[in-house]
Image (spheres, rainbow, N blue to C red):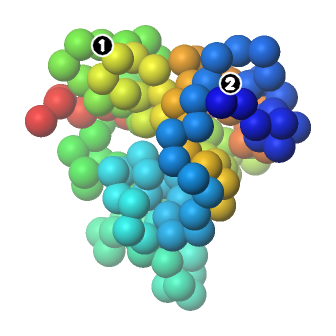
Amino acid sequence: MVSSKLERLFPRLSGVPYQITSPAVPDYNCVAWAANDSSRWWWPDEFYQYYWPEEAPRLPSLEAFAQAFQLLGFEVCSNLEFEAGWEKVVIFAGMDHVPTHVARQLPDGTWTSKLGNLEDIKHPHIHQVGGDAYGEPTLILRRRKR
């Protein structure tokens, strides 16, 4: 199933295969989804409105996001390609290097993204959700599969 609304927001989805995997819900965001947590919204806001790991800085920075995922067992890497035995997450950022989105690689090498308050999708290429809305993949992390 395709969505003209998603394709307007994320033009790189147009004309390529992607799949909506769950309905739009406001309960969690892309950061939580990438961390395998669909029960709450993750964001390092200074007013503590949202969940954020206590040990990670409560700042919207690549460093804070890296630390949050390192607390989950991830390590920084430089390879976007699928690696057997590893789980990967990619943090997107705009030109200002402020994180905008996080996607998780699935066991078959495709990617999954929660698109804000919108649906979760499965997409074959990480760059399909990049562009004006989310910037580009900026930081890659991986951990051994459990």
Say which amino acid is labelled 1.
Glu
Quarter the N terminus occupies: top right
- Is residue 110 visible in the rendered structure shown here? yes
Q: Nearer the viewer, mark 2 or mark 1?
A: 2
Measured along the vertical axis of the image, is residue 91 above or below residue 56? above
- Residue at (54%, 18%) from the top-left corner? 124
Residue reaching furthest to the front: 1
- Residue at (24%, 24%) from the top-left corner? 86
Say which amino acid is labelled 2.
Gln
Total labels drawn: 2
- Mark 2 lies on a secondary structure that is helix
Residue reaching furthest to the left: 146
Q: Nearer the viewer, residue 10 or 75?
A: 10
Tell me which numbered mark, 2 or 1, is placed earlier along the sequence: 1
**Residues at marks 2 and 1 touching, judged by CB atoms closer than 8 Å:** no
Residue reaching furthest to the right: 8
In the image, residue 72 lies at what x, y percent?
A: 25, 51
Residue occupied by mark 1: 83
Residue occupied by mark 2: 128
Measured along the vertical axis of the image, is residue 80 above or below residue 122? above
In the image, residue 26 lies at what x, y percent?
A: 59, 68
Quarter the C terminus occupies: top left
- Residue at (83%, 29%) from the top-left corner? 11
Residue count near mark 2 (Cα–Cα under 10 Å), binned few <14, some 14–19, many ≥20: some
Q: Nearer the viewer, residue 25 or 145?
A: 25
Q: Nearer the viewer, residue 139 or 123?
A: 123
Would residue 130 appear left or right of 9 to someone viewing this image?
A: left
- Mark 1 lies on a secondary structure that is loop
Residue 74's tag is: none
